[in-house]
């Protein structure tokens, strides 16, 4: 699946599984790239992943469409994420429709935006430079985080921003912006997410979950509730989460076996 096909799938409202990556080992990325995900999101906002590491991870992921969550809204940094070969970006801490519009502009070449030309990996180091530049504006995936009170209040205008491909719900930062941290499952946070989701559905805006689903069906972030809210672009897990839950499960099995006795 290429990025254009991925965006079309999102616009059709089809369920789209992805995964978060925050670890720096390229062999982990290589394994993740082979399991048939629609997309992978690499977090460069809250991790030790620098540009060199990002490039190595992107190479290891192969043909899986890959988004990089930027560390902030700086267009110069966003440009470099794309020049490393990311198929798109997720821009955090957006406060308004104007900032959403600026995020789109940072990802698009003129006349649609302000991105400077100089792609390296995505142009095959110049071998396909003209072909890449001709298609980049259509192929690049632009998503923003919905995680502040400001952007929620301006969400009607956000939905009118041209070139915006998806919005990702960031429940924890949203709760912080609402003065409710660490209660990101507070009913007021969930009600705000419901409001955003309803508007997104009504306007055909693909909505991504920033959190992997909880196993507890009663959680507001369970598979069932995320899908019921209208979130169709969902990270099924994270690399670090899979290691933690797998290790915890093995420890539980060990303790149970040890408690049962033996020869």
Image: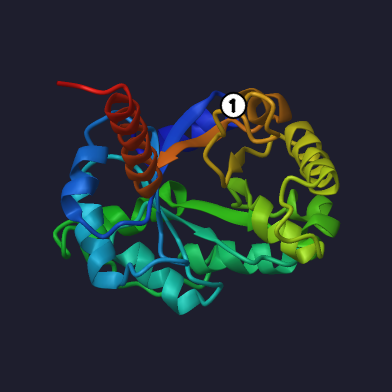
- Judge the density around disc 1: few (<14), some (14-19), many (≥20) Cα neighbours within 10 Å: some
Name the quadrant containing residue 215.
top right
Task: Indicate whether 258 appears above or below 117.
Answer: above
- Give the color scheme: rainbow, by chain, secondary structure or one colour: rainbow
Left or right: residue 201 compared with residue 81 = right
| Element under disc 1 | helix
Q: Quadrant of the N terminus?
A: top left
Task: Indicate whether 142 appears above or below 17.
Answer: below
Residue at (81%, 62%) from the top-left corner? 178
Q: Quadrant of the C terminus?
A: top left
Left or right: residue 190 compared with residue 88 = right
Name the quadrant containing residue 38.
top left
> Residue 131 location, x and y as percent?
27, 53
**Residue highlighted by disc 1:** 223
Instruction: Return the residue nearer the eye: 56 or 119.
Output: 56
Q: Can residue 249 be seen by looking at this rendering? A: yes
Instruction: Return the residue nearer the eye: 40 or 262.
Output: 262
Task: Indicate whether 8 appears above or below 28.
Answer: above
Outermost residue, front direction? 263
Left or right: residue 160 compared with residue 106 = right
């Amino acid at each position: 699946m290429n990025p254009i096909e991925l965006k079309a799938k999102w616009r059709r409202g089809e369920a789209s599984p992805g995964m978060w990556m925050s670890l720096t080992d390229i062999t982990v990325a290589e394994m993740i790239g082979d399991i048939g995900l629609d997309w992978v999101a690499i977090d460069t906002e809250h991790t030790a992943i620098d540009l060199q590491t990002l490039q190595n991870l992107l190479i290891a992921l192969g043909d899986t469409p890959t988004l990089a969550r930027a560390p902030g809204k700086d267009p110069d940094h966003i440009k470099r994420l794309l020049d490393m070969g990311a198929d798109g970006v997720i821009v955090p801490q957006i406060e308004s429709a104007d900032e959403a519009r600026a995020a789109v502009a940072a990802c698009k070449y003129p006349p649609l935006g302000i991105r400077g030309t100089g792609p390296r990996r995505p142009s095959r180091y110049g071998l396909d430079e003209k072909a890449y530049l001709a298609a980049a504006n259509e192929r690049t995936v632009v998503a923003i985080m919905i995680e502040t009170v400001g952007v929620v209040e301006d969400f009607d205008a956000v939905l009118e921003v041209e070139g915006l491909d998806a919005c990702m719900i960031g429940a924890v930062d949203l709760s912080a912006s609402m003065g409710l941290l660490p209660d990101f499952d507070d009913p007021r946070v969930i009600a705000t997410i419901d409001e955003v989701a309803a508007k997104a559905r009504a306007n055909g805006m693909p909505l991504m979950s920033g959190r992997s689903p909880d196993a507890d069906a009663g959680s507001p972030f369970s598979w069932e509730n995320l899908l019921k809210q209208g979130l169709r672009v969902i990270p099924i897990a994270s690399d670090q989460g899979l290691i933690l839950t797998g290790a915890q499960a093995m420890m539980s099995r060990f303790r149970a076996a040890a408690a049962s006795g033996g020869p």
